[in-house]
Image (cartoon, grey):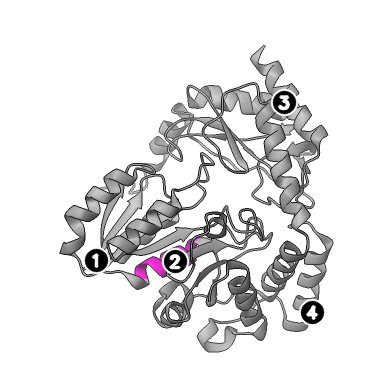
Amino acid sequence: MNCDPYDWIEPAINTMRRASWYRTVQAIEGKPGAVIQLAGKEVINFASNDYLGLAGDDRLIQSSVAATQEFGTGSTGSRLLSGHRELHRKLECAIASLKQTEDALVFSSGYLANLGAISAIVGKRDLILADTYNHSCLKNGAILSGARAIDYPHKDIEVLRNQLFQQRSNFRRCLIITDSVFSMDGDLCPLPQLSNLAEEFNCMLLVDEAHATGVFGATGAGCAEHFSIANSKLIQVGTLSKAIGSLGGFVAGSKLLIDFLRNRAASWIYTTALSPADTAAAISAIALINSEPQRRQQLWDNVAYLKQQLPLPIIDSQSQIVCCQYPNAKAALQASFQLKNAGIFAPAIRPPTVPTSRIRFSVMATHELEHIDKAIAALTKILL
């Protein structure tokens, strides 16, 4: 046989192109912010997860530079070997304080935090029940764990209850997993009902707070605070790369849980520790979240203004993520292209990432009303 074992790749790419699923990167120049340079052109940025506008804040930058000068550019090893610095522990204490939990553990990304936590606490004799709209890292964490994983329809509490009634007694442990803010629709999970079911059926409950931390709740603690859910039994996973404006992930929960994960979470044990620069930036960001609540209020004011002005129906958003639905991928791509020509960076989100195509607006605290007005004007012109 003389055939090329890689000859399937080009046809696969061509299939993506025909379906309008093919993707390429776009280089952003300079600092992140509400206004950015994209391919040499100034555009208003509605594509960022930097919800509080902290990623370009000079105070975070200065903290990163100082940490790099003191500790170097890399941590040089895993936390259990040569990679641990007191800076890491300081960040974990700051996260636990923000999340109102007993302790926290920092990972090198939010994706790794979910993979590590889920695969450590359940295994082949256990059951996972998961919202069908969960992020990829939750889905892959369930697969990696080896547990029996069953999806329930998006936010359908009655179906979840029936699944628990039918299945719970057949397994040693049960873990319910969900995003708190669903990143592609902007809606919230029914956390109070999930918490009640977890208690009723003796289940663990893991909530991915990636898009909620720093944004929801009176102090920015997230959806647990927003819904007034007691944190003592909740497993909260999150990222440092969105509202916190840095890089990395975390698990927050009880001291016993965190101690267990230090010894069993493979994606923490076998990964080089977070860099000093990223760690220091995250510590500074949490301090600013605590001391500058006006950032959060400005974000919510901007969200309300955008929703009031949009000329298209939006998917049921309850967060800073606001989506306008389009009939197909081609239409969404065309709208995104026209918006970019008008100076608005709001990307099309398409299958297979989501079941239906949409333009996704991510609102930031640092957007000005003028920015939102320009986006509304551009979107209205496209519709004419």
- Kindly report the distance in space between the C-alpha atoms of the residues bearing marks 2 and 3: 39 Å
The answer to whether the residues at label 2 and label 3 have Cβ atoms under 8 Å apart is no
Where is residue 61? Give x, y as percent.
79, 65
Span shown in magenta? 111-119
Relative depth, front residue between 197 and 375: 197
**249 vs 155, nearest the viewer:** 155
Distance from Cα at disc 4 to Cα at disc 2:
38 Å
CA–CA distance between discs 1 and 2? 18 Å
Foreground of the two, 88 or 36: 88
Q: How far apart are marks 3 and 1 (CA)?
A: 49 Å
The numbered mark, 4 or 2, whose residue comes first in the sequence reads 4
**Mark 4 sits on what residue?**
69
First in sequence, mark 3 or 1: give its number: 1
Say which of marks 3 and 4 sits in front: 3
Residue at the spot of label 2 = 234
- Identity, as a three-letter code, of the amino acid under mark 4: Gln
Separation of marks 1 and 4 at Cα, in angstroms: 47 Å
Question: According to the image, label 1 marks what residue?
Answer: 126
The main secondary structure of the magenta stretch is helix
Q: Residue at x 68, y 68 (%)?
A: 282
Q: Residue at x 70, y 71 (%)?
A: 283
Assign a secondary structure to mark 4.
Answer: helix
Q: Furthest-bottom residue in view?
A: 81
Q: Which residue is drawn at 45% across and 83% down?
A: 259
| Horizontal side, residue 139 vs residue 29: left or right | left
